[in-house]
Image: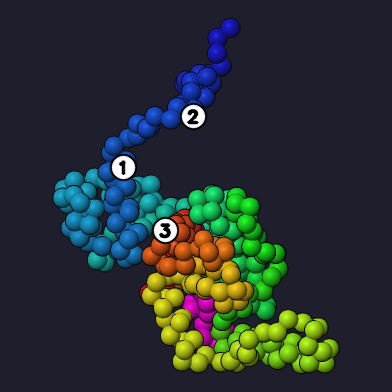
Amino acid sequence: MASPRSEAGGTASDDADDRSDSRPQRGIQSIEVGGQLLRALVQQGRPMALKDLAREAGMVPGKAHPYLVSFAKLGLIEQQPASGHYGLGPLALQLGLIGLQQFDPLRLASERMAGLALESGHTVALAVWGNRGPAIVRVEYAPSPVHVAMRHGMVMSLRGTATGKVFAAYLPRATVTAALAAEAAWAQATERHRSEQGPAALPATPGHPSPGLDAAFEQELQRVRAGGLGAVVDEAVVGVSALAAPVFDTQGRIVLALTLVGPSATFDARSEGAIGQQLKRCADELTLRTGGQAPA
């Protein structure tokens, strides 16, 4: 019996072989070359003259023009009547909108957590901003037998956790100030409850958090923005360290934080360390895949 044929003309078994073949697949070079023009328009973020666009794509104008004509017929590129500059067309916009619908940052981040936990050897937590501050929505425990207690719904301190510092560094100042005030009020209420119930009722907490953005915390947030990572060593819990990295949306706003947590004895909390760079690469890739960009 003859093998059923696919719509492309090959057999179904041929298609299966193509999917399972690990060798690099051969593409169409002309499409890849022309794609550099689209990439240049995306990177520049504005309509461009032919000579400038060709230069950014690494080709001469005479070579670039036929590609632009074909892209314009497809709607990927359009030429502005007044200036003659080339910009992205309506089909490119439609593709972008569909891409945004398909690439949900929470789903993509969740898919990466197991691999990051395995690669780093530490527990991975995913947090979003909730009505009380940064809240853990998913945890992937490390493969090692040493686990750091994390739970879904846990609200993270802005001052005492790597997750909180990352959100505080990139959220609007008014949002951070209000959250710090609420955090300080909660700590004071907890302290009052402790004093009413007696010294053995609840474990003691060191000091009271400031209700505002003091100079020391401002400097800490500047370090987070400069390095792209929030870090804590033995702050919220003695013996526990963490690193956190932000993921941004198309407007440069933080939408979630990826956090690595582990025992301080085996955790390298340096931003330039191996696990810090692993975490940052993962967060940057998620930002890129969802069409996001880091704030200027």
Residue 32 is labelled as: 1
Q: Residue at x 28, y 38 (%)?
A: 30
Residue 97 is labelled as: none
Picture coordinates of residue 76, whole percent (x, y): 38, 51
* Dot 2 or dot 3, earlier in sequence: 2
Q: Is residue 179 magenta?
A: no
Residue 182 appears in the rendering: no
- For discs 2 and 3, the disc positioned in front in the rendered view: 3
Residue ranking furthest to the top: 1
Picture coordinates of residue 257, whole percent (x, y): 54, 67
What's the magenta region? 165-175
Residue at which label 2 appears: 19
- For discs 2 and 1, the disc positioned in front in the rendered view: 2
Question: Can you tell which quarter of the image residue 41 is in?
Answer: bottom left
Mark 3 element type: helix
Badge 1 vs badge 3, beta-carbon distance below 8 Å: no
Q: Residue at x 24, y 45 (%)?
A: 66
Which kind of residue does numbered mark 3 sit on? Ala
In this rendering, the answer to whether 241 lies above or below 25 is below
Question: Can you tell which quarter of the image residue 70 is in?
Answer: top left
Which kind of residue does numbered mark 2 sit on? Arg
